[in-house]
Image (cartoon, rainbow, N blue to C red):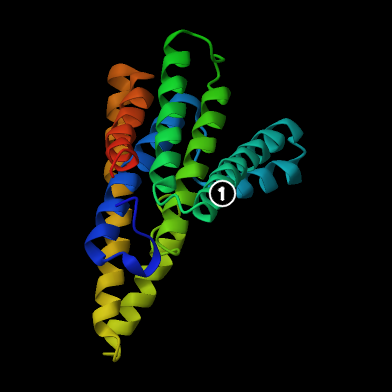
Amino acid sequence: MLIREGNERNQSIDLRLAAMLSLVAGALNAAGFELAGLFSANMTGNISAMADNLAKGGWGAALLFGLIVVVFIFGALIAGLLIEAGRQRGKRRIYAAVVALEAGLLILTGLAALAGLTGADGVEVICLLAVALGMQNAVSTRISRARVRTTHVSGMATDIGLSLAGLWLRSAESARYRGLLALHVTTILAFLGGGVLGVVLHRIAGPVTFLCCGLLLALIALPEVFRR
């Protein structure tokens, strides 16, 4: 799932990747909002909120929303640099290694929050989650050649509409459109389900939610890292 890339991948591999990573992304995004009232994966919403606050003179809030976008990009940058360095050296397990790194970051975030080392307003946690989700979205986008994007629900919704249009017109590529439709619907449903689970778990266990997400990603990534 985290070894093959591009045209080496099939529908089954992409579906599993989309379901698992989108579930985690949805849980983190929703749990972060439950904690601090801020989204760590919704960059469209953060840019819109930044613009709204700039227009109203809310410079502090605008800076906060901008910061979340910047650290998300930073996470994607780190993942991109590691992936390219690994690919140049023929390290096919680099994608799994980056997901394992994301898992470690989430585990450390959960432990820091449990120990009271993060601020009471949760902003530090949101920034760490944004870094992790930037890394994750970079991995899924790069390994699948943009077929799977685990935090980009707006893009997935658009792709669902395009796939339905292709099926409606009975295009010669109907089989491809059916595959894309299944992939995008799976991504959104997994993100939604993860969001529900994230809120419920956060209300029950608080920062343990981030630990659980990190451990789940570790279970996904580590067997791939150590595969021969």
| Residue 206 sits above or below residue 65 on the image | above
- Classify residue 59 as left or right of residue 32: right
Residue drawn at point x = 36 percent, y = 42 percent: 26
Residue drawn at point x = 29 percent, y = 78 percent: 176
Instruction: Residue 100: name its quadrant.
Output: top left
Type of amino acid under label 1: Ala
- Classify residue 22 as left or right of residue 126: left
User: Considering the numbered disc 1 on the image, is that residue within a helix, a strand or a loop?
Assistant: helix
Q: What residue is disc 1 on?
A: 85
Residue 135 position within the rendered picture, expressed as x and y whole percent measured from the top left: 50, 43
Residue drawn at point x = 31 percent, y = 28 percent: 215
Quarter the C terminus occupies:
top left
- Classify residue 148 as left or right of residue 118: left
- Residue sitting farthest toward the top: 115
- Classify residue 226 as left or right of residue 12: right
Residue drawn at point x = 56 percent, y = 46 percent: 76
Residue 33 position within the rendered picture, expressed as x and y whole percent measured from the top left: 45, 32
